[in-house]
Image (spheres, helix red, strand yellow):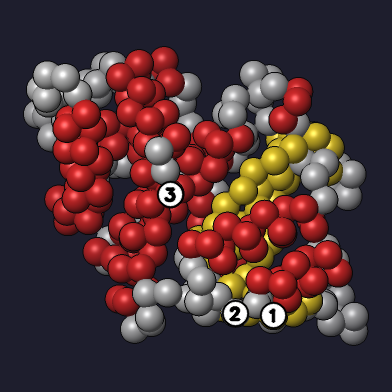
Protein backbone atom coordinates (compact mmCIF):
# COMPACT_ATOMS: atom_id res chain seq x y z
CA UNK A 1 0.00 0.00 0.00
CA UNK A 2 1.37 3.42 -0.95
CA UNK A 3 1.97 6.12 1.66
CA UNK A 4 -1.12 8.30 1.79
CA UNK A 5 -3.74 9.37 4.26
CA UNK A 6 -6.28 6.50 4.48
CA UNK A 7 -9.93 6.85 3.53
CA UNK A 8 -12.76 5.29 5.59
CA UNK A 9 -13.41 2.83 2.75
CA UNK A 10 -9.82 1.49 2.75
CA UNK A 11 -9.08 -2.12 3.65
CA UNK A 12 -7.56 -2.85 7.03
CA UNK A 13 -4.52 -5.13 7.10
CA UNK A 14 -6.72 -8.00 8.33
CA UNK A 15 -9.21 -7.56 5.49
CA UNK A 16 -6.45 -7.23 2.89
CA UNK A 17 -5.00 -10.52 4.15
CA UNK A 18 -8.29 -12.18 3.10
CA UNK A 19 -8.38 -10.61 -0.36
CA UNK A 20 -4.67 -10.50 -1.28
CA UNK A 21 -4.17 -14.23 -2.08
CA UNK A 22 -6.86 -14.23 -4.80
CA UNK A 23 -5.54 -11.08 -6.48
CA UNK A 24 -1.89 -12.13 -6.20
CA UNK A 25 -2.65 -15.54 -7.71
CA UNK A 26 -4.41 -13.77 -10.59
CA UNK A 27 -1.44 -11.41 -11.11
CA UNK A 28 1.12 -14.23 -11.05
CA UNK A 29 -0.87 -16.21 -13.62
CA UNK A 30 -1.09 -13.10 -15.81
CA UNK A 31 2.65 -12.43 -15.51
CA UNK A 32 3.40 -15.95 -16.76
CA UNK A 33 1.55 -15.09 -19.98
CA UNK A 34 3.41 -11.78 -20.52
CA UNK A 35 6.45 -11.79 -22.87
CA UNK A 36 8.59 -9.76 -20.43
CA UNK A 37 7.28 -11.25 -17.22
CA UNK A 38 7.83 -7.90 -15.53
CA UNK A 39 5.35 -7.07 -12.73
CA UNK A 40 3.25 -3.93 -13.07
CA UNK A 41 4.24 -1.00 -10.86
CA UNK A 42 0.78 -0.46 -9.41
CA UNK A 43 -0.05 -1.98 -6.02
CA UNK A 44 -3.06 -4.30 -6.10
CA UNK A 45 -4.15 -3.11 -2.66
CA UNK A 46 -4.28 0.49 -3.91
CA UNK A 47 -6.38 -0.62 -6.88
CA UNK A 48 -8.85 -2.50 -4.70
CA UNK A 49 -9.04 0.39 -2.23
CA UNK A 50 -9.88 2.65 -5.19
CA UNK A 51 -12.68 0.30 -6.24
CA UNK A 52 -14.06 0.31 -2.70
CA UNK A 53 -13.90 4.12 -2.69
CA UNK A 54 -15.90 4.33 -5.92
CA UNK A 55 -18.33 1.65 -4.74
CA UNK A 56 -18.87 3.25 -1.33
CA UNK A 57 -19.11 6.89 -2.41
CA UNK A 58 -20.75 6.52 -5.83
CA UNK A 59 -18.43 8.97 -7.62
CA UNK A 60 -17.76 8.79 -11.39
CA UNK A 61 -14.48 7.13 -12.42
CA UNK A 62 -12.85 10.42 -13.46
CA UNK A 63 -13.51 11.91 -10.01
CA UNK A 64 -11.26 9.35 -8.30
CA UNK A 65 -8.86 11.23 -5.96
CA UNK A 66 -5.35 11.74 -7.29
CA UNK A 67 -3.66 9.85 -4.45
CA UNK A 68 -5.07 6.62 -5.89
CA UNK A 69 -3.69 5.11 -9.10
CA UNK A 70 -5.05 6.85 -12.21
CA UNK A 71 -8.73 6.20 -12.93
CA UNK A 72 -7.83 4.60 -16.27
CA UNK A 73 -5.51 2.15 -14.53
CA UNK A 74 -8.09 1.33 -11.87
CA UNK A 75 -10.78 0.81 -14.50
CA UNK A 76 -8.47 -1.49 -16.48
CA UNK A 77 -8.01 -3.79 -13.48
CA UNK A 78 -11.72 -3.59 -12.66
CA UNK A 79 -12.73 -4.55 -16.20
CA UNK A 80 -10.30 -7.47 -16.32
CA UNK A 81 -11.39 -8.75 -12.89
CA UNK A 82 -15.01 -8.41 -13.98
CA UNK A 83 -14.55 -10.21 -17.28
CA UNK A 84 -12.32 -12.99 -15.88
CA UNK A 85 -14.68 -13.64 -12.97
CA UNK A 86 -12.18 -12.64 -10.28
CA UNK A 87 -14.66 -10.40 -8.41
CA UNK A 88 -17.26 -13.19 -8.40
CA UNK A 89 -14.61 -15.69 -7.29
CA UNK A 90 -13.56 -13.41 -4.44
CA UNK A 91 -17.18 -13.15 -3.29
CA UNK A 92 -17.45 -16.96 -3.42
CA UNK A 93 -14.31 -17.50 -1.35
CA UNK A 94 -15.25 -14.91 1.28
CA UNK A 95 -18.77 -16.35 1.53
CA UNK A 96 -17.31 -19.75 2.42
CA UNK A 97 -15.09 -18.20 5.11
CA UNK A 98 -18.00 -16.19 6.54
CA UNK A 99 -20.20 -19.29 6.71
CA UNK A 100 -17.51 -21.27 8.54
CA UNK A 101 -17.12 -18.39 11.01
CA UNK A 102 -20.88 -18.67 11.69
CA UNK A 103 -20.49 -22.39 12.38
CA UNK A 104 -21.98 -23.44 9.02
CA UNK A 105 -20.67 -25.67 6.26
CA UNK A 106 -18.90 -23.69 3.49
CA UNK A 107 -21.43 -24.90 0.89
CA UNK A 108 -25.07 -23.88 1.58
CA UNK A 109 -28.07 -26.16 1.08
CA UNK A 110 -30.87 -23.57 1.24
CA UNK A 111 -31.44 -20.14 -0.28
CA UNK A 112 -33.84 -17.21 -0.65
CA UNK A 113 -34.51 -15.22 -3.84
CA UNK A 114 -35.79 -11.72 -4.48
CA UNK A 115 -35.53 -8.90 -7.00
CA UNK A 116 -35.01 -5.15 -6.77
CA UNK A 117 -35.80 -2.61 -9.48
CA UNK A 118 -33.66 0.55 -9.53
CA UNK A 119 -33.55 3.64 -11.70
CA UNK A 120 -30.67 4.12 -14.12
CA UNK A 121 -28.52 7.10 -15.00
CA UNK A 122 -28.71 8.76 -18.42
CA UNK A 123 -25.61 6.99 -19.75
CA UNK A 124 -27.17 3.52 -19.51
CA UNK A 125 -28.07 2.20 -22.99
CA UNK A 126 -31.78 1.97 -23.77
CA UNK A 127 -31.33 -1.64 -24.89
CA UNK A 128 -30.43 -2.74 -21.35
CA UNK A 129 -33.19 -0.77 -19.62
CA UNK A 130 -36.85 -1.55 -19.19
CA UNK A 131 -39.98 -0.69 -17.24
CA UNK A 132 -41.14 -2.47 -14.11
CA UNK A 133 -44.86 -1.77 -14.46
CA UNK A 134 -45.70 -3.03 -10.96
CA UNK A 135 -43.19 -0.72 -9.24
CA UNK A 136 -43.42 2.06 -11.85
CA UNK A 137 -39.64 2.15 -12.29
CA UNK A 138 -37.78 2.67 -15.54
CA UNK A 139 -34.36 1.13 -15.19
CA UNK A 140 -32.87 -2.25 -14.35
CA UNK A 141 -33.84 -5.22 -12.22
CA UNK A 142 -31.41 -6.95 -9.87
CA UNK A 143 -31.91 -10.57 -8.96
CA UNK A 144 -30.34 -11.63 -5.66
CA UNK A 145 -30.07 -15.14 -4.21
CA UNK A 146 -28.72 -15.50 -0.67
CA UNK A 147 -28.15 -18.26 1.86
CA UNK A 148 -30.24 -18.41 5.05
CA UNK A 149 -28.01 -15.92 6.87
CA UNK A 150 -28.15 -13.40 4.05
CA UNK A 151 -24.84 -13.93 2.26
CA UNK A 152 -25.09 -13.35 -1.49
CA UNK A 153 -24.67 -16.53 -3.55
CA UNK A 154 -25.86 -15.41 -7.01
CA UNK A 155 -26.52 -12.11 -8.79
CA UNK A 156 -28.02 -11.20 -12.13
CA UNK A 157 -28.98 -7.81 -13.62
CA UNK A 158 -31.27 -7.10 -16.58
CA UNK A 159 -33.72 -4.52 -17.87
CA UNK A 160 -36.48 -3.85 -15.35
CA UNK A 161 -39.09 -5.21 -17.77
CA UNK A 162 -37.75 -8.76 -17.51
CA UNK A 163 -40.14 -11.02 -15.60
CA UNK A 164 -39.49 -12.43 -12.13
CA UNK A 165 -39.61 -15.89 -13.70
CA UNK A 166 -36.79 -15.14 -16.15
CA UNK A 167 -34.70 -13.58 -13.36
CA UNK A 168 -35.41 -16.53 -11.06
CA UNK A 169 -34.38 -19.10 -13.68
CA UNK A 170 -31.09 -17.25 -14.22
CA UNK A 171 -30.42 -17.18 -10.48
CA UNK A 172 -31.20 -20.87 -10.02
CA UNK A 173 -28.90 -21.87 -12.88
CA UNK A 174 -26.08 -19.71 -11.55
CA UNK A 175 -26.52 -20.84 -7.95
CA UNK A 176 -26.72 -24.54 -8.79
CA UNK A 177 -23.58 -24.35 -10.91
CA UNK A 178 -21.63 -22.59 -8.15
CA UNK A 179 -23.21 -24.41 -5.20
CA UNK A 180 -24.38 -27.89 -6.28
CA UNK A 181 -25.45 -28.57 -2.68
CA UNK A 182 -28.43 -26.20 -2.84
CA UNK A 183 -31.67 -28.16 -2.52
CA UNK A 184 -34.16 -25.59 -1.22
CA UNK A 185 -35.18 -22.01 -2.05
CA UNK A 186 -37.87 -19.70 -0.70
CA UNK A 187 -39.37 -17.07 -3.00
CA UNK A 188 -42.17 -14.51 -2.95
CA UNK A 189 -45.38 -14.67 -4.94
CA UNK A 190 -43.83 -12.78 -7.87
CA UNK A 191 -42.13 -16.02 -8.90
CA UNK A 192 -44.58 -18.34 -10.67
CA UNK A 193 -44.80 -21.96 -11.83
CA UNK A 194 -41.97 -21.60 -14.33
CA UNK A 195 -39.47 -21.03 -11.51
CA UNK A 196 -40.94 -23.85 -9.41
CA UNK A 197 -40.73 -26.26 -12.36
CA UNK A 198 -37.21 -25.16 -13.30
CA UNK A 199 -36.11 -25.62 -9.71
CA UNK A 200 -37.53 -29.14 -9.72
CA UNK A 201 -35.48 -29.98 -12.83
CA UNK A 202 -32.35 -28.78 -11.01
CA UNK A 203 -33.19 -30.69 -7.85
CA UNK A 204 -34.17 -27.55 -5.90
CA UNK A 205 -37.44 -27.46 -3.97
CA UNK A 206 -39.00 -24.02 -4.51
CA UNK A 207 -41.40 -22.84 -1.80
CA UNK A 208 -43.53 -19.77 -2.49
CA UNK A 209 -44.01 -17.79 0.72
CA UNK A 210 -47.24 -15.81 0.91
CA UNK A 211 -47.95 -12.80 3.11
CA UNK A 212 -50.45 -13.26 5.92
CA UNK A 213 -53.70 -11.79 4.48
CA UNK A 214 -54.99 -11.11 7.98
CA UNK A 215 -52.13 -8.72 8.75
CA UNK A 216 -52.16 -5.24 7.26
CA UNK A 217 -49.14 -3.05 6.63
CA UNK A 218 -45.56 -4.09 7.22
CA UNK A 219 -44.87 -7.42 8.87
CA UNK A 220 -42.05 -9.95 8.76
CA UNK A 221 -42.64 -12.72 6.24
CA UNK A 222 -41.09 -16.15 6.70
CA UNK A 223 -37.59 -16.34 5.21
CA UNK A 224 -38.19 -13.50 2.73
CA UNK A 225 -36.92 -10.86 5.18
CA UNK A 226 -33.42 -12.36 4.96
CA UNK A 227 -32.81 -11.47 1.31
CA UNK A 228 -34.56 -8.11 1.76
CA UNK A 229 -32.10 -7.32 4.55
CA UNK A 230 -29.21 -8.31 2.25
CA UNK A 231 -30.44 -5.83 -0.36
CA UNK A 232 -30.42 -3.21 2.40
CA UNK A 233 -26.83 -4.13 3.27
CA UNK A 234 -25.52 -3.54 -0.25
CA UNK A 235 -27.51 -0.30 -0.55
CA UNK A 236 -25.18 1.33 2.00
CA UNK A 237 -22.82 1.52 -1.00
CA UNK A 238 -23.88 4.62 -2.90
CA UNK A 239 -22.80 3.28 -6.29
CA UNK A 240 -25.75 0.89 -5.99
CA UNK A 241 -28.50 3.37 -5.07
CA UNK A 242 -28.92 3.91 -8.83
CA UNK A 243 -27.53 1.87 -11.72
CA UNK A 244 -24.77 3.90 -13.39
CA UNK A 245 -23.13 1.07 -15.33
CA UNK A 246 -23.11 0.86 -19.12
CA UNK A 247 -22.93 -2.95 -19.01
CA UNK A 248 -25.13 -5.20 -16.90
CA UNK A 249 -21.97 -7.22 -16.21
CA UNK A 250 -20.54 -4.10 -14.55
CA UNK A 251 -23.70 -3.77 -12.46
CA UNK A 252 -23.23 -7.33 -11.24
CA UNK A 253 -19.53 -6.67 -10.55
CA UNK A 254 -20.37 -3.64 -8.41
CA UNK A 255 -22.69 -5.83 -6.32
CA UNK A 256 -19.87 -8.38 -5.92
CA UNK A 257 -17.54 -5.60 -4.72
CA UNK A 258 -20.11 -4.37 -2.18
CA UNK A 259 -20.72 -7.92 -1.01
CA UNK A 260 -16.99 -8.63 -0.66
CA UNK A 261 -16.60 -5.41 1.32
CA UNK A 262 -19.34 -6.49 3.73
CA UNK A 263 -18.10 -10.09 3.93
CA UNK A 264 -14.53 -9.13 4.77
CA UNK A 265 -15.79 -6.92 7.60
CA UNK A 266 -18.02 -9.71 8.85
CA UNK A 267 -15.12 -12.18 8.93
CA UNK A 268 -12.76 -9.78 10.74
CA UNK A 269 -15.47 -8.43 13.10
CA UNK A 270 -15.09 -4.88 11.80
CA UNK A 271 -18.10 -2.58 11.77
CA UNK A 272 -19.64 -1.08 8.65
CA UNK A 273 -19.83 2.73 9.04
CA UNK A 274 -23.11 4.33 8.03
CA UNK A 275 -23.61 7.78 6.54
CA UNK A 276 -25.36 9.05 9.70
CA UNK A 277 -23.34 11.64 11.57
CA UNK A 278 -20.62 11.92 8.94
CA UNK A 279 -21.48 15.44 7.78
Assign the C terminus to one quadrant of the image: top left
Mark 1 Cα-neighbour bin, 10 Å: few <14, some 14–19, many ≥20: some
Q: Secondary structure at mark 2?
A: loop
Q: Height in image: 72 above or below 108?
A: above
Q: Residue at x 78, y 76 (%)?
A: 208
| Residue 220 in sight here | no
Q: Height in image: 224 above or below 46?
A: below
Q: Residue at x 72, y 72 (%)?
A: 201
2 and 1 marks in contact (CB < 8 Å): yes
Query: Which badge, 2 or 1, is on the more N-terminal residue?
Result: 2
Q: Height in image: 76 above or below 207?
A: above
Query: Which badge, 3 or 2, is on the more N-terminal residue?
Result: 3
Q: Height in image: 144 above or below 248?
A: below
Instruction: Return the residue at label 1.
Output: 205
Assign the N terminus to one quadrant of the image: top left
**What percent of the width, then of the height, locates residue 147?**
52, 71
**What percent of the width, then of the height, locates residue 5?**
16, 31
1 and 3 marks in contact (CB < 8 Å): no
Instruction: State the CA–CA distance, disc 2 to disc 1.
Output: 6 Å
Instruction: Return the residue at label 2.
Output: 183
Q: Secondary structure at mark 3?
A: helix
The answer to whether 247 appears left or right of 214 in the picture is: left
**What percent of the width, then of the height, locates residue 106?**
37, 74
Instruction: Return the residue at label 3.
Output: 88
The answer to whether 241 appears left or right of 36 in the picture is: right
Q: Quadrant of residue 73?
A: top left
Q: Residue at x 66, y 71 (%)?
A: 202
Mark 2 Cα-neighbour bin, 10 Å: few <14, some 14–19, many ≥20: some
Instruction: State the CA–CA distance, disc 3 to disc 2.
Output: 22 Å
Amino acid sequence: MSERKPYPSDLSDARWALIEPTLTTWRNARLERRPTGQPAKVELRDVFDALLYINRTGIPWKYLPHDFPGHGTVYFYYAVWRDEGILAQLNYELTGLARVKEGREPEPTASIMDTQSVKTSTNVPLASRGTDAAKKIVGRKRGILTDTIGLILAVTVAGAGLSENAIGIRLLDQAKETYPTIAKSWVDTGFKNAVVEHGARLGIDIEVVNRNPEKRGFHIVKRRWVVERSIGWIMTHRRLTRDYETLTASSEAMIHIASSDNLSKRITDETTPTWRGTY
